[in-house]
């Protein structure tokens, strides 16, 4: 019967233009921007759900708005996890791999590690870290005041060696260990994170006093809430929410003693997943930046935006560039190799633009290249010369003339836009190919990694006269 209802529901949704997506639980999955889940840090289900809730509510890169900076953030998280704590202070204990493993291996999530350059604790120097898991090989942790952002939050898992490199401090001042986990309030602490597919995943901190949770959804904050899921877990992804539709959610905890408590209400709008910019190329005759990005399922087209840093006046400008159905875009208006360009792409959902994706992560500091010269050849029979000429390339300071076969004498770096060969210096009956590169400066010409254009078009020329007979010998370089 369930299978028949599922087929009928799928057909109905297709007729109304809404794609049916089966219900998805993210309990065993890790979002792409998380280094760890709570379950990877602890086997305690309530503590694991609290860690997931914290990452969803306070993601990496967000800002802690409380007091105390790194100390305040660490204590906040430790207090959410720890029921009982015990502090051991140290004087002159070196902050190194051996001591970190000896003192912290196997600690419970929610342990406060304080390090500094001083042998004793000083509240105005050093750094506080909330340890979530420590093994002989890796550390999982969270802290604030990182990444050059005041009170910037980070959640991370890394090798112990990488962890130690992050914090060039000399000593461990104290370790406040979490001795037992806290049973969370029966009122669910609710946070909503955008899943990798653009849908909303609800996370809440579990309580050992709760038997199950009911997830409700409404179209307005104070409207009628409809039950969408009953679970014993600590998260739920609303895979059926149509793109661009704003919903309000709440979670009801059903306690083992029969009482019920509701979370606060939070809104979320499902949107397309943001594209990922794969990179760019200037491998075209105009030297233009050609951007490429991943295809987004459900997207009808894409909008391209650009930040430009103008080297001349040291200023940034921002503009919308174009809308395209392709997953590539050539920026023909980026012409100066000295300027820097940063791009963002939005996936567009034509049925409801509120379902458009967030902007992609900015792809920074792209540089266009010089355009390739266009060359022509003129044979002056009277003077017995061949002149190679080309157009002046914008932003180019010089050019090089190239030829095949390679043993012909070439002029090197040129600032003019033509060069004349005396045909008496070339081999009669030999066919030569000529092309030109443009350079932004002489330094680029002298450097193997210099900024040069693509090769120009190739012109061929056969020197008048009879070719020398083949003597049947072997060239020494073969």
Image (cartoon, grey):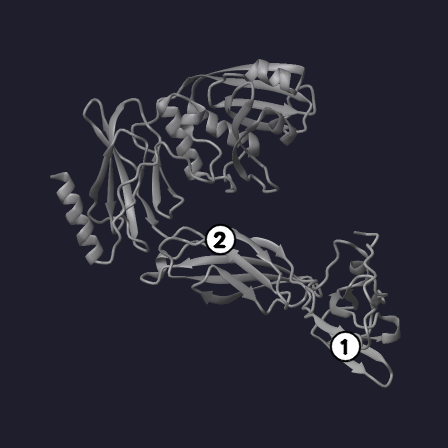
On the question of residue 393 being in view, the answer is no
Placement of the N terminus among the 4 image quadrants: top left
Image coordinates for residue 341, horizontal then vertical, percent: 61, 60
On the image, the x and y values in percent for residue 55 come to: 44, 36
Which mark, by number, is residue 360? 2
Where in the figure is residue 304, as x and y percent of width and height?
A: 49, 62
User: Which circle marks residue 389 in the picture?
Assistant: 1
Residue located at (81% from left, 54% from top): 474
Q: Is residue 237 above or below residue 360?
A: above
Q: Is residue 193 left or right of residue 150?
A: left
Label 2 packing within 10 angstroms: few (<14), some (14-19), many (20+): some
Query: Who's the residue at 15% across and 49% down the image?
Result: 8
| Cα distance between the residues tagged 2 and 1 | 44 Å
Using residue 340 as the reference point, say whether residue 390 is left or right of it. Answer: right
Determine whether, in the image, residue 279 is placed left or right of residue 460. Answer: left
Q: Residue furthest left?
A: 1
In this rendered view, identify the residue nearer to me: 298 or 283: 283
Q: Is residue 200 visible?
A: yes
Mark 2 vs mark 1: which is more N-terminal?
Answer: 2
């Amino acid at each position: 019967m369930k299978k028949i209802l599922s087929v009928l529901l799928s057909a109905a949704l297709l007729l109304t233009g809404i794609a049916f997506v089966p219900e998805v639980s993210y309990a065993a999955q890790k979002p792409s921007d998380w280094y760890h889940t709570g379950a990877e840090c602890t086997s305690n289900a309530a503590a694991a759900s609290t860690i997931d809730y914290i990452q969803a509510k306070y993601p990496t890169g967000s800002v802690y708005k409380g007091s105390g900076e790194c100390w305040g953030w660490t204590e906040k998280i430790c207090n959410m996890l720890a029921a009982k704590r015990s502090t051991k202070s140290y004087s002159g204990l070196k902050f190194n791999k051996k001591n970190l493993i000896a003192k912290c291996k196997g600690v419970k999530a929610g342990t406060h590690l304080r390090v500094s350059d001083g042998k004793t604790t000083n509240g105005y120097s050093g750094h506080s870290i909330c340890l979530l898991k420590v093994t002989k090989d890796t550390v999982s942790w969270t802290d604030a005041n990182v990444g050059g952002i005041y009170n910037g939050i980070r959640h991370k898992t890394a090798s112990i060696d990488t962890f130690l490199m992050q914090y060039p401090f000399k000593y461990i001042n104290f370790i406040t260990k979490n001795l037992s986990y806290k049973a969370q309030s029966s009122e669910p602490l609710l946070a909503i994170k955008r899943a990798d597919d653009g849908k909303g995943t609800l996370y809440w901190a579990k309580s050992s006093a709760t038997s199950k949770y009911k997830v409700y959804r409404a179209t307005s904050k104070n409207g009628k809430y409809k039950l969408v899921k009953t679970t014993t877990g600590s998260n739920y992804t609303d895979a059926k929410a149509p793109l661009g539709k704003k919903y309000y959610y709440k979670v009801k905890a059903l306690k083992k003693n029969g009482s019920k408590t509701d979370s606060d209400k939070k809104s979320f709008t499902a949107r397309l997943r943001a594209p990922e910019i794969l990179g760019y190329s200037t491998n075209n005759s105009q030297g233009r930046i050609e951007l490429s990005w991943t295809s987004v399922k459900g997207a009808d087209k894409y909008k391209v935006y650009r930040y430009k840093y103008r080297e001349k006046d040291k200023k940034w400008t921002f503009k919308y560039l174009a809308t395209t159905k392709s997953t590539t875009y050539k920026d023909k208006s980026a012409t100066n190799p000295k300027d820097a360009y940063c791009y963002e792409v939005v996936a567009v959902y034509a049925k409801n633009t509120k379902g458009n994706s967030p902007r992609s992560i900015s792809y920074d500091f792209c540089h266009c290249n010089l355009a390739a010269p266009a060359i022509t050849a003129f044979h002056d029979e009277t003077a017995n010369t061949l002149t190679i000429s080309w157009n002046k390339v914008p932003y180019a300071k010089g050019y090089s003339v190239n030829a095949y076969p390679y043993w012909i004498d070439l002029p090197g770096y040129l600032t003019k836009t033509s060069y004349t060969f005396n045909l008496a210096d070339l081999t009669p009956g030999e066919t030569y190919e000529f092309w030109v590169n443009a350079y932004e400066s002489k330094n680029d010409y002298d450097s193997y990694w210099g900024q040069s254009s693509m090769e120009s078009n190739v012109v061929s020329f056969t020197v008048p006269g009879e070719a020398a007979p083949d003597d049947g010998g072997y060239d020494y370089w073969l």
